[in-house]
Image (cartoon, coloured by chain):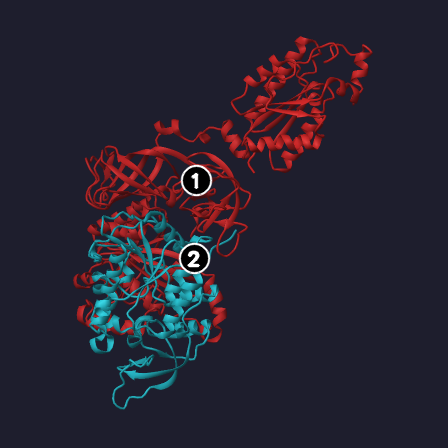
Chain colours: A cyan, B red
């Protein structure tokens, strides 16, 4: 008899989660961050509803500081799969000129990501939002339910999470409350990469090593992706073979030096590395328990 | 994600292939506060090289600031991820951690020890196959040990590792270890936990966690990791008959209607008959649709989409079941409940979610609640937070279920307060109450419907009447052949196999003709009861007898088919030379010659053999059966 591999089990669990939401929740949306986890999530959503298209739109909360390659990839993917793509920018933040260079990661992330996300969810009145967070990423995420509740103010109360037994999800909410749903909660970084490899899932080329212009700042290699990057006096971008383990705003996302140009090579590097995936993400290091605090405030 | 394997560096493709086929073990760690659960998980992660340098650096800093182990690493801080947990040094909510070894991939749920966080403990336990129950060797079995063991048993975890921790603090004393194990086994037996592996460990220093170490030479058993890597976990769902709760009906266009769901038991293949419960309608699987192409079979655990042979009605909450063994349908149950939020009040109506179905349920007065320490049954008015109790449930609609010990997915449920939306209780269904059996799906008794279901068809009698030589048997034979190739179960009763056996004592007088038809009709009735499609090919000249035969069957079970060949034509054909003999006086009471034939007044089907040849006649009959829902597809 067919024995399912752990990836097949994870896939079946994720598909089950997608279908539960569509069957029970009023107005779902998928948060699409353009990263590899979003790519896997999108692939799983297509599988869950095949031959129908996933019956919800994609929402990209755009900080306007993503890598150029991410914007190209996003538009190409949305067109290819025929799903509606909503791009939301916090106009007020933009008008105030909030940016990661002047304001630092905390203020930038709060205004352009956390506040923007809440504005978008309020504007379109989405009741449920899929996110690509995984429990192996970070300590507070390891504690979060697959169906995670948010108050009408979008706050997470980590000390009072709903019990979540078996695969029975209580999706009941009061007006204004919403649910964040994480279909790939139980996947690890290795699972995601292996699945991308086995299923040939398209990902942003930035994950693969290439010669890119970078500068070294505070222990991080930052890519000079456009002319908005303010170079310090005497600072000159050097061309190095680098790739990215995670993707966010380019001024906040450190590259790693690498020669890995295929998925198996990336996996090899990932497995042999001794630092975590989010190590290059500035926003994780804004003080202890920063992710938990951001999540409480409404960040994904 | 540091992994230890030389293959990674030397041959990544080979490593990926081996990793891809690893099995998955989900387990929990539980026990009382300070038994060292988080420390043990931290140790497992650390020893399997699952901790990154940046996390280790953070741990080092945290240990100095918040740690309870002086200058040493406090592994508990690796898992206790919430600020409140780190401040208080306790585990509030279940944390899921992931690691893999050469042999297996693991998801471990670190569950809180404090009684007030029982709801988080059961959340972690509900998806686990194995429980590591930690005991502080100095303290022995505590209330929480019993409480967690009871919950573990209630939630159907069959494999227990009794990890007696902090052996260093009792000088690695084997006697003390043996006493604790003996005491635990006695308690465990009373709550049906039998598969228990006891291991003396020291999580802080690592003895018997991954490596044996030198401190306990008297212990010859496996280390914790050895055991986790090799313990056999049976997949109960694989041995169940086919079960798939319909999760979502996929209708992208008018030509496609698929039933999406996750298989919770057994195997399914295209062509397999299925019954839709609770309605009881039957159909066959046409295709197993997935984005990766159509499948030849699918097994428990897979999320798939099925299309069926015909336009049967099924919606979310229904269960598709294999015909060989149907699940029960009931609306009153004996169940166990765990209080998760506030109090559960008898008499109040709650939303009950089981599988993909949501119904309203009322809890009858509690039978008892359990004193976890003594396992005593106590009287109780209501079920408070963290209480475990037994009760009867009354539902507003019948549901499809399996007892929890057979299927977690079809026997586990939650109760939701319709006003606060809180999940107030989780429960397990033990069995349906006798008094709801009157509405049970009849499959409990082996009866006509059950046999029909097994045969996946609508049993009935096709009664062919007409003159001798009209073509009845030829046509009946063709119809049977066609039905047979369609996979139907059939039988043909005609003069050849009836008159030579059961009716060989009967002649051709009017009286015998009546008895002949009566017997044939009764035999046909038994065969319909047995689930067959029966063809009766008899002259049966009298309308009264045909009506009497019809009266033996239910509506839609009897089809009178008039093989209309004019007398002159039948005599002209005279296939068997019988007309000639009758004309010559050798045969008495021959229908049409010296015995009357009463043509049917209103047959279901009339076949004019002067227009249709036998092949066309048989097709006409099959078409009629299809269009009248006797045959589907």
Q: Looking at this view, is B622 or B415 the one in front? A: B622
Disc 1 residue crowd, few under 14, some 14–19, many 20+, Cα 10 Å:
some
Q: Is residue B428 left or right of residue B614?
A: left
What quarter of the picture does the C terminus of chain A occupy?
Answer: bottom left
Q: Is residue B144 visible?
A: yes
> Please, is residue A21 above or below residue A242 in the view?
above
Parent chain of label 1 = B
Helix, strand or loop status at disc 1: loop
Q: Position of residue A261 (x, y in %)?
A: 45, 76
**Mark 2: which secondary structure?**
helix
Res. B230 visible in picture: no
Q: In this image, B595 relative to B369: left or right? A: right
Q: Residue at x 65, y 33 (%)?
A: B619
Residue positioned most to the right? B584
Taking the spot 67% from the left edge, 16% from the top edge, the residue there is B503
Q: Position of residue B539 (x, y in %)?
A: 68, 18
Q: Quadrant of residue B27?
A: bottom left
Looking at the image, residue B623 lies above or below residue A270: above
The disc at residue A46 is: 2
Residue A105 % position (x, y): 23, 73
| Residue B355's disc number | none
- Residue B314 is tagged as 1
Left/right placement of residue A18 relative to residue B476 reads: left
As drawn, is A30 to the left or to the right of A111? right
- Dot 2 crowding, Cα within 10 Å, few <14, some 14–19, many 20+: some
Residue B200's spot in the image, x, y percent? 31, 59
């Amino acid at each position: 008899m067919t024995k399912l591999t752990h990836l097949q089990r994870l896939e079946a669990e994720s598909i089950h989660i997608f279908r539960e939401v569509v069957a029970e929740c009023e107005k779902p949306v998928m948060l699409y961050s353009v990263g590899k986890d979003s790519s896997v999530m999108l692939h799983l959503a297509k599988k869950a509803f095949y031959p129908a298209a996933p019956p919800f739109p994609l929402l990209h909360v755009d900080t306007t500081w993503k890598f150029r390659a991410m914007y190209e990839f996003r538009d190409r993917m949305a067109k290819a799969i025929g799903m509606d793509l909503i791009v939301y920018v916090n106009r007020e933040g933009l008008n105030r000129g909030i940016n990661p260079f002047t304001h630092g990661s905390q203020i930038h992330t709060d205004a352009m990501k956390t506040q923007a996300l809440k504005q978008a969810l309020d504007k379109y009145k989405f009741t449920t939002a899929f996110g690509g967070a995984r429990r192996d990423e970070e300590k507070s995420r390891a504690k979060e339910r697959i169906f995670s509740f948010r108050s009408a103010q979008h706050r997470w109360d980590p000390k009072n999470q709903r019990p979540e037994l078996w695969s029975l999800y209580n999706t009941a909410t009061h007006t204004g409350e919403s649910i964040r749903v994480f279909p790939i909660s139980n996947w690890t970084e290795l699972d995601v990469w292996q699945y991308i490899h086995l299923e040939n899932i398209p990902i942003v080329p930035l994950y693969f090593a290439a010669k890119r212009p970078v500068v070294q700042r505070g222990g991080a290699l930052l890519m000079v992706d456009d002319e908005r990057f303010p170079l310090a006096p005497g600072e000159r971008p050097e061309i190095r073979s680098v790739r990215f383990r995670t993707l966010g705003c380019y001024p906040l996302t450190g590259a790693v030096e690498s020669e890995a140009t295929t998925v198996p090579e990336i996996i090899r590097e990932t497995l042999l590395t001794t630092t975590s995936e989010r190590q290059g993400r500035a926003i994780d290091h804004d003080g202890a328990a920063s992710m938990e605090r951001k999540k409480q405030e409404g960040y994904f | 994600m540091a992994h230890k394997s030389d293959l990674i560096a030397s041959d990544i493709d080979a490593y990926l292939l081996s990793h891809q086929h690893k099995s998955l073990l989900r387990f929990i760690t539980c026990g009382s506060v300070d038994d060292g659960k988080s420390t043990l998980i931290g140790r497992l992660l650390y020893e399997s090289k699952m901790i990154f340098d940046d996390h280790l650096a953070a741990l080092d800093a945290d240990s100095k600031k918040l740690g309870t182990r002086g200058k040493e690493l406090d592994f508990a801080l690796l898992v206790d991820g919430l600020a409140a947990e780190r401040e208080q040094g306790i585990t509030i909510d279940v944390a899921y951690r992931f690691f893999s070894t050469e042999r297996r991939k693991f998801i471990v749920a670190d569950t809180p020890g404090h009684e007030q966080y029982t709801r988080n403990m059961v959340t972690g336990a509900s998806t686990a196959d194995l429980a590591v129950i930690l005991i502080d060797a100095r303290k022995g079995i505590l209330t929480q040990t019993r409480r967690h063991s009871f919950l573990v048993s209630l939630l159907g975890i069959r494999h227990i590792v009794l990890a007696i921790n902090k052996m260093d603090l009792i000088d690695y004393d084997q006697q003390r270890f043996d006493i604790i194990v003996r005491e635990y086994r006695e308690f465990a037996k009373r709550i049906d936990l039998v598969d228990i592996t006891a291991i003396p460990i020291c999580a802080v220093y690592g003895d018997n966690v991954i490596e044996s170490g030198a401190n306990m030479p008297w212990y010859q058993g496996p280390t914790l990791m050895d055991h986790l890597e090799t313990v056999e976990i049976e997949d109960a769902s694989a041995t169940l008959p086919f079960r798939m709760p319909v999760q979502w009906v996929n209708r992208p266009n008018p030509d496609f209607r698929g039933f999406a769901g996750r298989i919770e038991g057994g195997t399914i293949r295209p062509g397999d008959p299925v019954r839709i419960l609770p309605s009881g309608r039957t159909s066959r699987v046409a295709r197993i649709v997935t984005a990766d192409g159509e499948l030849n079979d699918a097994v428990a655990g897979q999320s798939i989409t099925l299309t069926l042979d015909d336009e049967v009605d099924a919606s979310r909450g229904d269960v598709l079941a294999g015909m060989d063994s149907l699940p029960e349908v009931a609306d009153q149950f004996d169940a166990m409940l765990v209080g998760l939020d506030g109090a559960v009040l008898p008499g109040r109506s709650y939303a009950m979610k089981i599988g993909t179905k949501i119904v309203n349920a009322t809890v009858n007065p509690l039978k008892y609640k359990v004193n976890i320490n003594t396992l005593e049954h106590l009287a109780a008015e209501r079920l408070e937070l963290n209480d475990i109790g037994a009760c009867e449930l009354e539902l507003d609609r019948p549901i499809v279920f399996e007892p929890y010990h057979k299927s977690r997915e079809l026997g586990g449920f939650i109760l939701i307060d319709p006003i606060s939306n809180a999940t107030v209780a989780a429960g397990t269904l033990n069995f349906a109450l006798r008094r709801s059996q009157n509405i049970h799906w009849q499959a409990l008794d082996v009866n006509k419907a059950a046999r029909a279901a097994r045969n996946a068809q609508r049993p009935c009698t096709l009664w062919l009447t007409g003159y001798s030589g009209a073509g009845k048997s030829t046509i009946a034979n063709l119809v049977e052949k066609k039905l047979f190739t369609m996979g139907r179960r059939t039988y043909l009763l005609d003069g050849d196999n009836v008159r030579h056996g059961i009716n060989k004592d009967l002649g051709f007088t009017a009286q015998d003709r009546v008895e002949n038809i009566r017997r044939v009709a009764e035999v046909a009735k038994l065969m319909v009861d047995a689930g067959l499609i029966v063809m009766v090919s008899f002259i049966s000249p009298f309308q009264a007898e045909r009506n009497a035969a019809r009266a033996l069957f239910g509506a839609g079970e009897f089809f009178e088919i008039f093989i209309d060949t004019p007398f002159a034509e039948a005599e002209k054909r005279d296939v068997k030379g019988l007309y000639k003999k009758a004309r010559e006086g050798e045969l008495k009471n021959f229908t049409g010659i010296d015995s009357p034939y009463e043509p049917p007044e209103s047959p279901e089907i009339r076949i004019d053999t002067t227009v249709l040849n036998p092949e066309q006649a048989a097709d006409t009959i099959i078409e009629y059966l299809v269009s009248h829902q006797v045959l589907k597809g």
